[in-house]
Structures are given as structure tokens and as C-alpha cells.
């Protein structure tokens, strides 16, 4: 390599300095504070979802490569990027497993603690059947829930898969959203759930959103929850992040600061994916190897002797690894200066590890646990 590249990177991309230091001079910044003046003579921009990458940010700069360590790209003006001939790639799929684990944990929690019905009597609408939604559908079906899938654009492309219509979701007990944010196409998802269709929800319905905050009209939802106490909301994503609606936050059964996809494994995978894209674009040799903290307690005994509810055992197993409600409790500690608190929680998030890092020892052979734990990527030993 001749001249060193000049790189600006979001400081919250884990191990980004170690990964890219050999190739250039790196400036680390809070993602929300990156502006056009910081990029005048910069070659490479590395971001997460909090940086809006558009003409205002990039005009009259030297940026030739933009990489986002996230799956979603709604913060990127792809039309402008392409017109300028700027190389762009995302870390598509990096957080899939993390979001799936969050979603399944939330659904089992709400089933046990609030719905309190057998899973074969509970209907779930998985809205969005991409990398995340298809896995959620598969796992919930294996557990025994009655699951439908909704994905209009995929439905038009794949006639071999049976899909339901969006209106069918409103008769379900649980609606879980896994769609990209789309403002303009025939499949626009902006305010997909809104003041006009919220009243269609069945009594005691549960709404889960881990996709993008703008998929649900937060103001309409907050107002609807005031008048419909039987409806339960589980929200990880919000409109106007980080300055979220604290009234809505306090009405949620589970409210978290956009961390469903924030497992340590997912974040490192995001760094690794943009590093590989970077090296491919500049024809650099790939040398960096990510590092992971040692897991001291990664073996769990599950006593499946038939005398204990299997769904309860699953939830207790999940919560030994990742107690979802702790993230809820951390967010709700502060209503004042919520924006600063929201970003602090994301920046200083716990080293949550994904289920594939753990081995579950079953006391005896059990097809239910073998199938479900296998779908969740646990190592299973009888």
C-alpha cells in the first residue's frame, strides 16, 4: 500500500480501530456527530445506523467508500451514493441470530406471564419473511405456535410459498414485525401499523417491533394503548431515536433501546463483514482476526424429567444466558434526558452472547428440546 487512507469511523463499531489501523489513519467519532466538515479529505466512512449518509453529509468530500456495520440501510441515500460512484456495502445478516433470539425470548415470556394459554392455541403473525422473519417462523412453528407469514413483495416473487395477507394479522394473538423501512414503493412499510388499522387488533393482542421504529406510528400507538388496556406492546425500535416517546415507553410490557440485534457476536460479525468488503474493494490482504471474550459458564444442565412445563424450562434456559427484562429495566430508569440515556445504553451495552456459544446437557432424550434447541443453534448433549 502506498499512501495511507484517511478513515472516519463510528466509535461504537467494536474493534474497528484494530481491524483498520494497518490501512490508514483512523478518526473515531460518535456516529451522530459526524458531519460534512469531518469528511472533506476522507477516503473511507464507516458507520452504524445513527449516521444519516446523504448528499448533505458527502457533498464536496473525497469519500470513495462507505460501509455500514448494520443490516438495515434506511439511513443511507443509496440513489445519491450510486450516482456519485461511491462504493457501498452493508453487513447484511450480521444481526439475524441476535434479533431472532430476542424475539423468541419475548414471545415465550409474554406467553407464560401474560397470555397464559397453550402454545397450540396462540396464533402469531410474522410480518416480513426475510432472514430474521423466516427463522422466527421456523422456531415458533417447531415450538407449536400457530404461525402465519406475511410478505407481499416476496409473495409476488415466490409462488411456491403460502403467504397470508396483512389483514389476516389482526386476528392473531401476536404480531411481530421484521420488515425493512420503505417510504415510497407499493410495499411501503412507513406507519404500517397506524391509527386506521390499530382498532382491527383482536382483544389482548401483542405487538412486537424489532425492525424500524417508523414502521409503527408511535403517537397513534401511544394513544391507542390509553384506550385499549388489553393490548400489549414490546418495542425495541422507536420513532425519533434517541429522543423517544417516554410516555409510550412507560406503557410497554418490554421497552429496550434498539439492542435486539446488539449481541456481541452480531456486532463483531458486522465489523468483520465491512472489513472484508473494505479489503476486497481496495485489494488488501485480510489479516485481522476478531477477538471474543472467554465464556467461563457456557454449559447448562436442563433437567427434562417430564414434571416441569417445557415452555417454562425454555424461558429459564434463555434467561440464564440473556435476561431480556434487564434491558427493559435499564431503559426505564430514566425519563429525563432520555436521548442521552438511550445512546449511553447502546454504547455501553453488555457483552451478550448468542446461544450457539452454549452447550445444553439434557438429562434424558427429548425430541421437543432436541428440535427446538437445535433450531436455536444450541449444542445439545444427552
Image: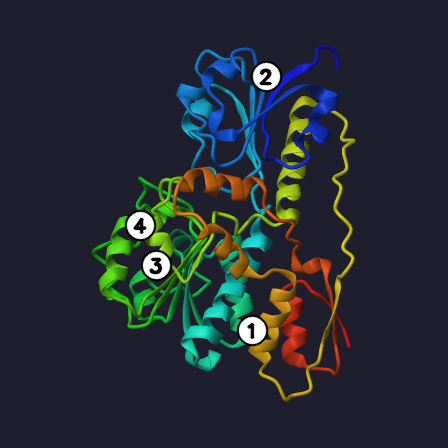
- Label 3 environment density (alpha carbons within 10 Å; few <14, some 14–19, many ≥20): some
Residue at left 75%, top 61%? 298
- Quick check: 45 above or below 188? above
Q: CB of mark 3 within 8 Å of CB of mark 4? A: no
What colouring method underlies this structural image?
rainbow
Disc number lying in front (2 or 3): 3
| Cα distance in 3D space between marks 4 and 2 | 38 Å
Residue under label 1, please give it.
142
Residue at left 56%, top 39%? 347
Residue 4 image-quadrant placement = top right
**Residue 290 rendering spot, x and y as whole percentages:** 74, 39
Q: CB of mark 1 within 8 Å of CB of mark 4? A: no
On the rendered image, what quadrant is the C terminus found in? bottom right
* Residue 217 visible at all: no
Residue under label 3, please give it.
251
- Please tell me the numbered disc located at residue 218: 4
Residue at left 69%, top 59%? 356
Residue under label 2, please give it.
43
| Cα distance in 3D space between marks 3 and 1 | 31 Å
Amino acid at each position: 500500500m502506498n499512501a495511507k487512507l484517511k478513515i472516519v469511523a463510528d466509535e461504537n463499531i467494536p474493534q474497528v480501530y484494530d481491524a483498520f489501523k494497518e490501512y490508514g489513519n483512523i478518526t473515531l467519532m460518535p456516529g451522530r456527530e459526524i458531519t460534512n466538515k469531518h469528511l472533506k479529505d476522507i477516503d473511507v466512512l464507516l458507520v452504524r445506523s445513527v449516521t444519516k449518509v446523504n448528499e448533505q453529509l458527502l457533498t464536496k468530500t473525497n469519500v470513495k467508500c462507505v460501509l455500514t456495520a448494520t443490516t438495515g440501510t434506511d439511513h443511507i441515500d443509496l440513489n445519491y451514493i450510486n450516482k456519485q460512484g461511491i462504493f457501498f456495502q452493508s453487513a447484511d445478516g450480521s444481526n439475524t441470530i441476535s434479533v431472532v433470539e430476542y424475539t423468541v425470548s419475548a414471545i415465550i415470556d409474554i406467553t407464560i406471564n401474560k397470555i397464559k394459554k397453550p402454545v397450540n392455541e396462540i396464533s402469531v403473525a410474522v410480518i416480513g419473511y426475510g432472514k430474521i422473519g423466516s427463522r422466527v417462523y421456523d422456531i415458533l412453528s417447531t415450538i407449536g405456535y400457530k404461525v402465519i407469514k406475511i410478505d407481499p413483495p416476496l409473495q409476488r416473487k415466490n409462488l411456491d410459498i403460502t403467504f397470508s395477507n396483512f389483514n389476516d394479522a389482526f386476528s392473531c394473538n401476536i404480531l411481530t414485525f421484521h420488515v425493512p423501512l420503505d417510504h415510497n414503493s407499493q410495499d411501503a412499510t412507513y406507519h404500517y401499523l397506524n391509527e386506521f388499522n390499530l382498532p382491527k387488533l383482536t382483544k389482548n393482542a401483542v405487538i412486537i417491533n424489532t425492525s424500524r421504529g417508523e414502521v409503527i406510528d408511535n403517537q397513534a400507538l401511544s394513544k391507542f394503548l390509553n384506550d385499549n388496556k388489553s393490548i400489549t406492546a414490546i418495542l425495541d425500535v422507536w420513532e425519533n431515536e434517541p429522543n423517544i416517546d417516554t410516555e409510550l415507553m412507560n406503557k410497554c410490557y418490554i421497552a429496550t433501546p434498539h439492542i435486539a440485534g446488539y449481541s456481541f457476536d452480531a456486532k463483531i460479525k458486522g465489523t468483520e463483514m465491512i472489513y472484508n468488503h473494505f479489503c476486497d474493494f481496495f485489494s488488501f490482504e485480510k489479516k485481522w482476526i476478531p477477538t471474543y471474550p472467554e465464556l467461563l459458564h457456557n454449559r447448562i444442565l436442563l433437567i427434562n424429567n417430564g414434571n416441569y412445563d417445557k415452555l417454562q424450562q425454555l424461558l429459564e434456559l434463555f434467561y440464564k444466558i440473556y435476561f431480556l427484562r434487564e434491558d427493559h429495566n435499564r431503559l426505564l430508569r430514566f425519563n429525563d434526558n432520555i436521548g442521552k440515556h438511550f445512546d449511553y445504553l447502546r454504547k455501553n451495552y453488555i457483552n451478550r452472547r448468542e446461544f450457539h456459544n452454549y452447550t445444553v446437557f439434557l438429562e434424558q432424550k427429548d425430541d421437543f428440546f432436541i428440535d427446538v434447541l437445535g433450531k436455536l443453534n444450541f449444542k445439545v448433549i444427552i
